[in-house]
Image (tube, helix red, strand yellow):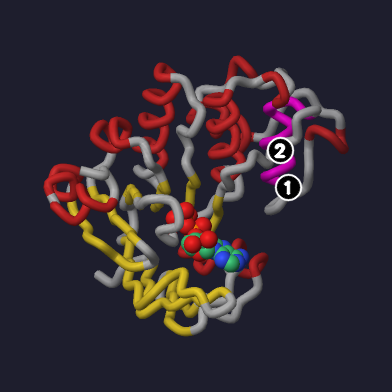
Amino acid sequence: MSPLLEVRGLNVVFDGFRAVTDLDFSVAAGELRFVIGPNGAGKTTLVDCITGRTKPASGRITFDGQEILGRREHRIVRMGIGRTFQTSVVFEELTVGENLDLAASFRRPLVSLLRRRRAYPDDVVQVLETTGLSDLVDRKAGVLSHGQRQWLEIGMLMVQQPRLLLLDEPVAGVSKSERERTGELLVEVARTHTVVVIEHDMEFLRRFATVVTVLHEGRLLCEGSVAEVQADPRVQEVYLGR
Ligand code: ADP
């Protein structure tokens, strides 16, 4: 079966600096893939190219067999690719339910804010359950913990019904107990979606990752299970500093 996402020979150059070099990267439908690498490895640049934010110098990116390069960002979102950013995008003054409803209004009319209805539509209710945020539906997003905010952001992607979710460091700054829940949520989301996660936390990877892609200085260093990647001397040298 051909991969859902396929990146071939990607090159990105910023003012003469090669941020990504000859990168091949593919993800099968239904995978939960982790991408790691030291700062400056090219992880964000890769995601920026997939989402149409950065224009590569050369290469091909296909999603479900369709070429992505050359499409505008909003068109790529409509193809079914959603992403989170390292900086939060929730509306702090709105409640959890309202944030989800607003995100879903990308596909359908807004219910909670415009019509002042108390009950949320089924898509919001379902995501509240999946993310474990049902009890916090009326809580303002601004008072959520780091972990709860991450679950909300993942939920805000889910209500848009993407096929591929690209998540940027979902456990950065998140407490240990909430990390566990975030990992479980990622595994759950990957039952029905394809998920690519940029994440540095090795303990988290050991617990939840199956396949890990390691980037270094804009190139693919290696790919494999957590154990394989950790045992690779090149990874130990560049990433773990041993
Ligand atoms: P990572 O996400 O792995 O930390 P990035 O993809 O953010 O790495 O960056 C890869 C390299 O490209 C870094 O050296 C970074 O400084 C450089 N870079 C990223 N974005 C830009 C930009 N807009 N202009 C110039 N250099 C950039």
- Residue at 24% across / 70% down in the picture? 1
Which residue position is annotated with label 2? 101
SS of the residue at dot 1?
Answer: loop
x, y percent for residue 58:
46, 84
Question: Please, what is the three-letter code of the amino acid marked with disc 2?
Answer: Asp
The residues colored magenta run: 94-105
Q: Report the residue at 60% width, 62% height from top.
A: 77
Residue 226 lies left or right of residue 199; in this view the side is left
Q: What residue do we see at 59% from left, 81% from top?
A: 70
- Horizontal and vertical percent position of residue 20: 42, 71
Q: In the rendering, at what x and y percent does residue 90 appear? A: 69, 37
Give whichever of 194, 230 is nearer the camera.
230
Q: Is residue 102 magenta?
A: yes
Residue lying at 18% horizontally and 54% vertically, measured from the top left: 224
Q: Position of residue 240 (x, y in %)?
A: 26, 43
Q: Is mark 1 within 8 Å of ligand 1?
A: no
Residue 228 to residue 73: above or below:
above
Q: Nearer the viewer, residue 140 or 232?
A: 232
Secondary structure beneath dot 2 equals: helix
Q: Residue furthest bottom?
A: 58
- The majority secondary structure of the magenta stretch comes to helix
Q: Is residue 110 left or right of residue 149?
A: right
